[in-house]
Amino acid sequence: MTKTTTTTAKIPARAVRFDEIGGPEVLKIEDVLLPAPAPTELLIRVQALGLNRAEALFRSGAYYYPAALPGSRLGYEAAGVVEAVGAEVTAFAPGDLVMTGPGIEMSAQGVYGDRVVLPESAVVARPATVDAITGAAAWLTYSTAYGALLETAGIRPGDHVVITGASSGVGTAALQVARRIGAIPIATTRTTAKRRQLLEAGAEHVLVEEESDPAKETLRITGGKGADILFDAIGGPDLPARAAGLKEGATIVLYGWLDPRPIALPMSWPQTIHTYNNVAFSARPAYRRRFDAFLHAGLRDGSLRPVIAEVFEGLDRIQDAHRLMETNTHTGKIVVRVAD
Ligand SMILES: NC(=O)c1ccc[n+]([C@@H]2O[C@H](COP(=O)([O-])OP(=O)(O)OC[C@H]3O[C@@H](n4cnc5c(N)ncnc54)[C@H](OP(=O)(O)O)[C@@H]3O)[C@@H](O)[C@H]2O)c1
């Protein structure tokens, strides 16, 4: 493991790629030759991959930017070990434990594979106490929850925070981030199946949409006052109905569009709505510094501990991992172990 400078040797790797838009079955594992890292890039040996809904949307043509076909790569989040660094890389050295996530363009740089070359800016340090499975589930989920709740909504101790689609990777991270601040997380889910898991994941209250109206329940829980923050993954025309459980002047952070239908807002709207884009946030150095400190402190003291739904053994299980995501039966993060 040496510093890479001028070598032009290609590096053999296995990569998940797809040639057409479709379901999990379009994902293929191919032998590829990676270029040696450029001066500001790193070569990483991937140990584990964390799945995100974004990747299912990208693969099926429903993401906010399109896949470059044929031969598109896939994936934002991985944990691994640095194998080589370009001549201008200063923050990392071979042997360092790392996580990936910020600023990745999936078609060219997707991390689903056993080796990947990435710019230094897309890589973050992984503390020695954080194993690869945990590392593959930590960066994107907690950075989204942190950026939306702390940096955007200004969450404070004692705030009631409604977290919709709370069983998601980001949702379960948001439950823990709210708790770490001393806020009161209220989780929503569509069916009763995940109630126990959501309580175990840190929800103070679980509101099941098929049982009762979450907005009315939120008003009851807050003694009629209404919640302070809505952290919403869903959007769609039902957003005003979900917001009916908020206090006047509350903050809504809309970070996902799981319901792709247009949002219809009434003329008079008593809350502040922010949209949230983690790519834009993580491009800011000051944000990256604050979030790194928050994440590392939380991982160290155990208040941030990713909820892992299932670990699939081997890159060859990537289609199965995507199939599980399509069922929506998981709570937390789906991870694929690639190597030790
Ligand atoms: N803005 C950003 O920077 C950013 C960053 C990361 C993720 N995201 C977005 O965050 C969302 C969650 O991502 P993830 O990877 O954490 O998700 P995930 O782990 O796949 O989980 C999504 C969960 O949401 C619920 N759900 C799914 N479809 C729904 C629908 N149509 N209506 C209501 N609930 C639905 C389901 O839970 P129940 O069955 O329990 O209801 C499902 O388990 C995605 O939209 C993703 O694109 C945005």
Image: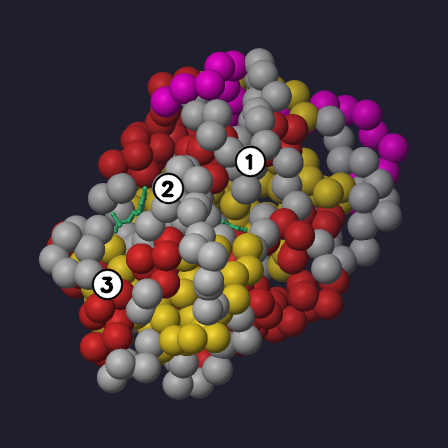
Left or right side of 255 for 281: right
- Label 3 crowd (10 A; few <14 / some 14-19 / many >=20): many
Determine if the C-beta at disc 2 is less than 8 A from ligand 1: yes
What amino acid is at disc 2? Asp
Q: Is residue 198 shown above or below 278?
A: below
Q: Of marks 2 and 3, which one's residue comes earlier in the chain?
A: 3
What amino acid is at disc 1? Tyr
Residue denoted by label 1: 64
Q: Residue at x 44, y 85 (%)?
A: 157
Query: Is 213 or 270 nearer to us in this picture?
Result: 270
Residue denoted by label 3: 214
User: Which quarter of the rendered picture does the C terminus lie within?
Assistant: top left
> CB of mark 2 within 8 Å of CB of mark 1?
no
- Label 2 crowd (10 A; few <14 / some 14-19 / many >=20): some
Left or right side of 180 for 330: left
Q: Does residue 13 belong to the magenta stretch?
A: yes
- Label 1 crowd (10 A; few <14 / some 14-19 / many >=20): few
> CB of mark 2 within 8 Å of CB of mark 3?
no
> CB of mark 1 within 8 Å of CB of mark 3?
no
Q: Position of residue 207 (x, y in %)?
A: 21, 64
Q: Residue at x 45, y 73 (%)?
A: 250
